[in-house]
């Protein structure tokens, strides 16, 4: 198995190298994009967790509003 005779010349070799370089640049760009998306998703999850924690604190404060144990005092 090998290249066809049309791909064995210098021009074809350079064209293949250019194609491979373009593919490597594309993969590098995809890697950066995926890493950025993972970072954004992680930051979003952290922020969402913080909002949920704040919501739980508000819910607990409402539960203790009429209680003898009041955290706002």
Image (cartoon, helix red, strand yellow):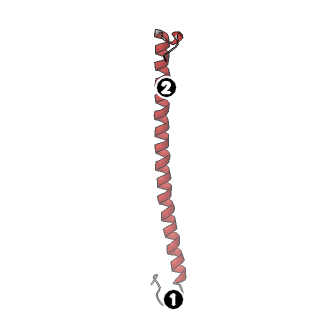
Q: Specify which label sits upstream in the sequence, 1 or 2.
A: 2
Q: Where is residue 14? Give x, y as percent.
A: 46, 15
Say above or below: 58 vs 48: below
Q: Quadrant of the C terminus?
A: bottom left
CA–CA distance in space, label 1 to label 2: 68 Å
Judging from the image, what secondary structure is the residue with disc 1 in? loop
Q: Nearer the viewer, residue 49 or 9?
A: 9
In the rendered image, the vertical position of residue 59 relative to residue 19, given as above or below: below
Per the image, the residue denoted by label 2 is 22
At 50% from the left edge and 52% from the top edge, which residue is drawn? Answer: 41
Between disc 1 and disc 2, the foreground one is 2
Residue 62: x percent and y percent? 54, 80
Mark 2 surroundings: few (<14), some (14-19) or many (≥20) residues within 10 A: few
Q: Secondary structure at mark 2?
A: helix
Count of numbered labels shown in the rendering: 2
Q: Are marks 1 and 2 in contact (CB under 8 Å)?
A: no
Q: Residue at x 51, y 73 (%)?
A: 56
Residue under the point 50% across and 55% down: 44
Q: Is residue 11 above or below residue 66?
A: above
Residue with the most extreme bottom position? 68
State whether residue 18 is above or below residue 53: above
Which residue is at the front of the view, 41 or 68? 41
Residue at image mark 1: 67
The x and y percentages for residue 16 are: 49, 18
């Amino acid at each position: 198995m090998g290249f066809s005779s049309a791909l064995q010349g210098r021009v074809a070799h350079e064209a293949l190298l250019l194609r491979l370089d373009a593919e490597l640049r594309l993969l590098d760009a995809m890697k950066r994009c995926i890493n950025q998306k993972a970072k954004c998703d992680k930051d979003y999850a952290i922020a969402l967790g913080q909002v949920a924690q704040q919501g739980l604190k508000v819910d607990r404060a409402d539960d203790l509003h009429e209680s003898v144990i009041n955290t706002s005092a």
